[in-house]
Amino acid sequence: LISFILKFLLLLCKFPHPTSADNEHLRRGTDRSISAHTKSRTKSDSTKPFSSKRRTTPAIISIPTPSILAPPKMQSRQLNLFQSPTLSCPNDSALVQMFFTTDDNANHETSASFADSNGATSFDMQVGDLENNKNYHVQECLPKQSCYILTLNDEAGDGICCDHGTGSYSILYDGVEVASGGDFGSSAVHIIGCESWSPSVSLQPSFQPSTSQTPTVPTGQRNDKEREALIQLFKATGGEKWHNNRGWMEETELHCYWHGVHCNVEGDEEYERTNGPVVRIELEGNGLNGTIPSEIGLLSTLHFVTLQDNAITGTIPSEVGMLSELSYIHMNGNEISGTIPTEIGKLYNLEDISLEDNNLVGSIPSEVGLIQHQLNRLNLSTNHLNGTIPSEIALIPGLSTLHLSTNFLSGTIPTELGSLTNLDATLNLSSNKLTGTIPMELGMMSNIQFLDLSSNRLVESMLHLGNFASLTHLDLSQNELISFPLSQGWTNLEVLDLTDNEIHQKVSSLDIEGLSYIKDLFLSNNYYYGTIPNKIRSLARLEKLHMDHNSLFGTIPDDVLSLVRLRELKLSHNRQETECFDGFVHCDITPDDYQGGDVCCNGDNGKQICADEAGVDIVFYGRLFCLTTGLSGPIPVVRQN
C-alpha cells in the first residue's frame, strides 16, 4: 500500500500545478465567455427591452433543506443557486443575494424577474413557475457600475404576506440588506446598484415623485407588459408625428411620465402619476394616425381611455375585452371601421362609452346588454350601423343617455326601452330608418329631458299616453306622422318640433294651454288647417312660432301681440290655389244651405280643405264650392296712443 501511494504522488509531480496567475486567467476567460453571451442576448433584445414574451430558463430553484446543491447548467447568466458557501467576488463586482420565501398561493399569483439596465434577464419566473411555501436563494457577482431591477408581482394584490401565509424576501448587496418585505400589494420593484443611486431604490406604490424634477429609471423596470403595450400603441399610430410625444420611447424614463399616460396606486382617486399600474391614457386630438394594436389588451388595469379626435383607422381589436377594469372609453371622431366587437360585453365596469363619428358597420351586438352594472352613457351615433335596435339595451338599468342617431338602423322602436326609467338625460334615435308607431312605453321614462326621434319613417305616436313630466325637448320632425295629440302632462316642455310630417289636423284642436313653458313651437310643412286660435295668448314664454307651409286661413289674431317674448313668427305659404268641390257630395254644407262663414270640403286622399267666408265662392249654377284658402286681413300691430 505504501508503495502504491508513493507511485501515485510521483505521477502527480509530473503535471505542473496551476499558479494563482493561471487561476485568474481561467476565471477571466470564463467571464469573457459569459459576457459575450450576455452582450449577444442584449443586442437582440435591445429593440424590445421590456417584451413580456422574452423568457429564459429560470435561474432559481427550490431549496427544501439547507443542504449544499450543485449549480445546474444555465442558459442565461451563470448564477450560483445554493445557500452556502457564499460566493467570493472580484473587486470590480458586488455580491447580490436574494432570499425568497413564497406563500400559500405563489403558484397561481406570484411572478418575479431580475434584469440588468439593458433588459437582459437573469431569471424571469412567470405565474406558475414558483412553488407554494418554498424557500429560494439566488446569489450572483455583478459589475458594480451597472444597474439591476428586481420586480415582484402578485396578481391577487395581496403580496406574499400575510393573508395567505408568511412569505417574505430580502436582498443583500455586498452583505448589506438593502431591501426586504412581503406585504407589497400588487407589485414591488427595487433598483439595485447604479453609481448614481443608493444601493436600492424602491419603486413600490408609496413612491412619490419630486414635483421639481421627473425621476427617471433605466429600462427593465416594473411592468414589462404595460410598457410593451404602450410602445406598440406608439408605433402603430405614428408616434413620431404626434403633436406631443414627450418622453415616449425614452429608455431612461419611467413610462408613467410619458405624455398622456397616468399611473396610480390603489385607492388614489386623484390619479396622480406614480409608478403604479397604468390607469389612464389621454391622447385626444394628438395626431394619432394608424391602428389600435391588439397589445392594448395587456393594459389590464386601465380605467380611462380618451383617443377621440384623431385619425385612427382599422378595427377595434377584440382584445379590448381583456380590459376588465375599464370604466371610460372615448374613441369618437376617428376613422375606425369594422364591427363593434362582441367582447364589449365583458367590460362589466364600463360607465361611459363613445364611438361616435366613425365608420363602424354591422349591427349593434346584443352583448351590450351584459354591461349591466355601471354603464350610464352609450354613444354610437354617426356611423354606418344597420339592423335593428337590440332590445337587450333595456337590460342596462343605470343608463341615463343613449345616442344611436345618424346610422342605418331599421325596424320598430323596441317597447322594452321603456324600462329604462333611469334614463334622465337623452334618448336620440334620429336620422335612421325606423318605422311603425312610437310606442307608449317610452312614456315610462318619466325622468327623460331630451327625446329626438326625428328623420325616420314613423307614422303614428302614442307618446301622449305616457308621463313626460321632465321632458324639455321633443323633436319628431321629418317623419310621416299623420296626427300628433298633445298631452296635458308636458308642463316642462320647452321645444316641440313637428316640422315636415303629414299631420292633417285642425290647428285649434291642439291642446296648447298645457304647454305653459314652451319657447319654440315648430309646426311647419304639414297640413294643419283652420284659423289660428285665440288661446295662443296662453303661451306667454313663446319665442319662436313656425306655422308656415300649412293650410291655415282666416285672419291673424291680435292675440299674438300679447306674446311679448316672441321674436320669430313664420306664417308664410299658407295661401293655396283655388280648388272647387261638389257642394252636395264633398263638403260639410250644401250651397243651398250656406249662409256665410267657414266651409270645409274633403279633398284628395281624405285631406280637408277649408276657407273662411272671404275665400268661398259658389259657382256652376249653385252646385260647386270654390275655396281659396290662406291667411287674410291686416297684420296685427301695436297701436300707439
Image (cartoon, rainbow, N blue to C red):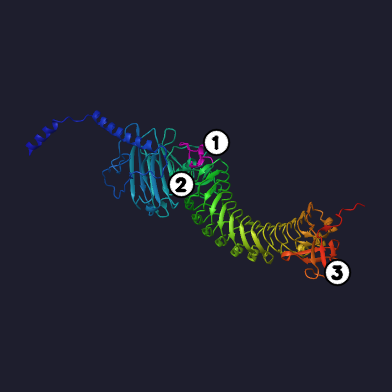
**Residue type indicated by callout 1:** Ser
Q: Quadrant of residue 409?
A: bottom right
Residue closer to the observer: 609 or 453 = 609
Q: Residues within 10 Å of mark 2 (few under 14, many from 20)?
A: some
Span colored in magenta: 236-259
User: CA separation, marks 1 and 2?
Assistant: 33 Å
Tag 2 residue: 295
Tell me where residue 413 appears, x and y as whole percent.
61, 62
Q: Which quadrant would the N terminus be assigned to in this image?
A: top left
Tell me where residue 126 appears, x and y as whole percent.
38, 48
**Element assignment for label 1:** loop
**Residue type indicated by callout 2:** Glu
Q: Residues within 10 Å of mark 1 (few under 14, many from 20)?
A: few
Residue visible at 32% across and 34% down? Answer: 36
Tag 1 residue: 212
**Residue type indicated by callout 3:** Tyr
User: CB of mark 1 within 8 Å of CB of mark 2?
Assistant: no
